């Protein structure tokens, strides 16, 4: 029998109000008895297309911030954000792994499969990376994750091409593929891309604002690039959901596993206390219009959406006012 998260009641006005941050009586997050990623997670990155070195450094800094090896950043931190993801367990009671580390990297700057990728050609991109004659990416069928990051001039099938529907089913979903990669080994893949087009107002929100929200001023990105700063939040969204629902049979809401509403989908657009609708919630002020909610390694700052907390049953993050 599947487990269902419940929301507890309290007399604390602030905590009571948090019940409505992303919560809905129509959405029930349930555990469907499948595995979560309990082994150490290793992220193998494929940089597809032309990637400027500064953009790579921003994304690497975010990924390293999930589980920093030394000098942990000040609170609120990316690693504290990951602790919410770690609350999810499998049927043995084992939690999502604490350890998330960077693995191998592969540069595909010559667009080996063209500038228009389908799900099938993405599979070929991965296969080429792990079977390359020089410096192939390692095959790690347990905790290995292949993260394909495409440059802004690459079109990706079904990526950010549909209008925002609602908080639980949005165009920010990135295709999830479990690919037969090599000698029968299947591995999880999450796909990202630079978000300078075609719909930055959706894909890079709140650093760009869609036309259907008039009068809302976009925030300045904390690392100086709208596309890459927007991409960081999408990557965090997807890694959180991959860890808690790697085979699409663990933690999700809804009855159709083909269209699951996962733990980050429930908190789309919520980055701080009071968030909901077109309001991001209360954030930290970096000056010059910059807003952020998490500190990372090397003094980096990030704005990353909150995650559904299964214990109280609402969206939460380390920058919440009651933390």
Image: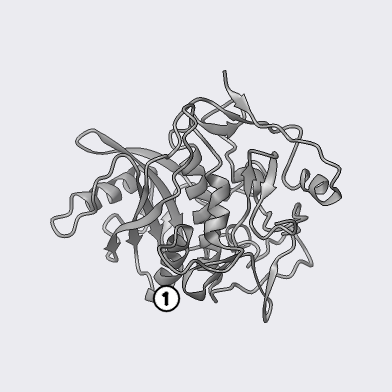
Left or right of 169 on screen, residue 48: left
Image-quadrant location for residue 9:
top right
User: What residue is shown at x 46% (from left), y 35% (from top)?
Assistant: 94
Residue under circle 1? 54
Please determine whether, in this image, residue 174 is positioned above or below residue 155. Answer: above
Residue 268 location in percent, x, y? Answer: 65, 50
User: What residue is shown at x 67% (from left), y 50% (from top)?
Assistant: 316
Left or right of 237 on screen, residue 52: left
Residue 174 location in percent, x, y? Answer: 49, 48
Seen from the viewer's position, the closer of residues 2 and 278 is: 2
Residue 320 location in percent, x, y? Answer: 70, 57
User: What residue is shown at x 67% (from left), y 54% (from top)?
Assistant: 269
- How busy is the neighbourhood of tag 1: few (under 14 within 10 Å), some, or many (20 plus)? few
User: What residue is shown at x 47% (from left), y 58% (from top)?
Assistant: 66
Looking at the image, can residue 309 be seen?
Answer: yes
Residue 252 location in percent, x, y? Answer: 57, 34
């Amino acid at each position: 029998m599947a487990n269902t998260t419940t929301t507890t009641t309290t007399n604390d006005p602030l905590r009571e109000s948090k019940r409505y941050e992303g919560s809905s009586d129509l959405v029930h997050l349930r555990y469907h008895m499948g595995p979560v990623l309990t082994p150490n997670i290793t992220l193998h990155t494929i940089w597809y297309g032309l990637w400027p070195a500064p953009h790579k450094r921003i994304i690497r800094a975010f990924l390293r911030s999930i589980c920093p090896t030394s000098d942990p950043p000040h609170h609120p931190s990316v690693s504290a954000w990951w602790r919410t993801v770690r609350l999810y367990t499998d049927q043995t009671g084992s939690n999502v792994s604490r350890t998330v580390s960077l693995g191998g990297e592969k540069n595909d700057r010559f667009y080996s499969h063209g500038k228009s990728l389908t799900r099938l050609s993405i599979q070929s991109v991965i296969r080429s990376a792990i079977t390359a004659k020089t410096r192939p990416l390692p095959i790690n069928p347990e905790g290995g994750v292949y993260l394909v990051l495409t440059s802004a001039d690459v079109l990706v099938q079904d990526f950010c091409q549909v209008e925002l529907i609602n908080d639980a089913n949005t165009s920010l979903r990135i295709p999830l593929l479990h690919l037969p990669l090599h000698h029968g080994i299947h591995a999880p893949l999450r796909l990202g891309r630079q978000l300078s087009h075609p719909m930055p107002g959706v894909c890079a929100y709140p650093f760009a604002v869609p036309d259907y929200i008039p009068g809302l001023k976009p925030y300045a990105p904390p690392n100086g690039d709208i596309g890459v700063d927007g991409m960081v939040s999408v990557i965090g969204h997807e890694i959180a959901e991959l860890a808690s629902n790697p085979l699409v049979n663990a933690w999700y809401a809804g009855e159709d596993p083909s269209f699951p509403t996962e733990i980050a989908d429930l908190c789309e657009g919520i980055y701080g206390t009071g968030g909901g609708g077109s309001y991001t919630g209360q954030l930290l002020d970096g000056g010059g219009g910059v807003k952020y909610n998490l500190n990372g390694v090397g003094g980096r700052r990030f704005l990353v959406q909150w995650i559904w907390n299964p214990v109280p049953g609402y969206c939460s993050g380390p920058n919440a006012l009651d933390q």
